[in-house]
Image (spheres, rainbow, N blue to C red):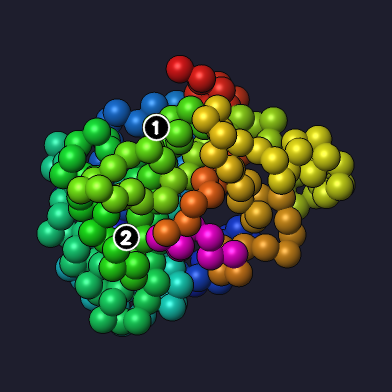
Amino acid sequence: MSKVHLTLKSSNIKTGEISVSTTEEDSCPTSCPLRGQGCYADGYPLKGHWNRVPDIGLDWDDFCQTVQDKATALWRHNQAGDLPHKNGQIDADKVFKLEKACRLGGKKGFTYTHHDMSDSMNRLIVMICNKAASFVINLSGNSMSHADDLAELVSFGHKPAPVTTVMPSFYERKHVKKGVWSETYDEYRSRVDLWNIKTPKGKKVTVCPATYRDDMDCAKCKLCAMSHRETIIGFPAHGNRKAKASEIANDTK
């Protein structure tokens, strides 16, 4: 049984001071091409925290109660890890219990999943959560081509979820180190044609503002917490293994 740790107030400048959870690595689907092959969570210091979750984390019921009672009004589930599952099928009982905890506590949670959406039950579970809107589940694309596929999914006549994607590192704003830019905002915007990025099938891609702006974080942005969002949110490959992640993100089928 995967344990979950809840940080009540994150110190990560990209998330802002919101609550952030971390779930044991066995929650991640084995089918995810980034698992051990470019996942940003494999880099330190996050990896060090992730490794400790089995010892410091909560069982699911206690985690849900803590979210209901103590999480910030907006919070992020899984800075590392994925939704609970049984052999690749999302555990509906657990996910719906977390959605209920958000609803009863007046919270707005958001997360991302790499679980297989060709599974109709996985799509249905995700869609039900997103209809409730208190716990928003984004579908995670491995590339912009994959994001196109996810954006075209249908469950009972409805789009099950908003979509995000990993992007090639080309779309990362150039920097010397974290927070020290070697490229001005205007140079970056011009180089990547920031307002006109599209998937191969022409769907609009919005680069996560927290990845290139000093004045933006999840607490302010809230795009990933919008359940009926049309634009695809893109996250440029970053971290210690960004070269591998970028290679995967460059895949055009």
| Left or right: 215, with 38 as reference point | right
Screen quadrant of the C terminus: top left
| Left or right: 98, with 236 as reference point | left
- Give the residue furthest to the top: 253
Q: Compared with residue 57, is residue 182 higher up or lower down, i.e. above or below?
A: above
Identify the residue shown where x is 35% and y is 55%: 137
Name the residue tied to disc 2.
Answer: 130
Q: Quadrant of residue 92?
A: bottom left
Looking at marks 1 and 2 on the same chain, the residue that comes earlier in the sequence is marked by 2
Residue 49: give x, y in percent of width and height: 43, 52
Secondary structure of the residue carrying tag 2 is: helix
**Residue 222 inside the magenta-drawn segment:** yes
Relative depth, front residue between 252 and 59? 252
Q: Compared with residue 142, is residue 24 higher up or lower down, i.e. above or below?
A: below
Relative depth, front residue between 36 and 74? 74
Identify the residue shown where x is 12% and y is 59%: 93
Give the number of the disc on residue 149.
1
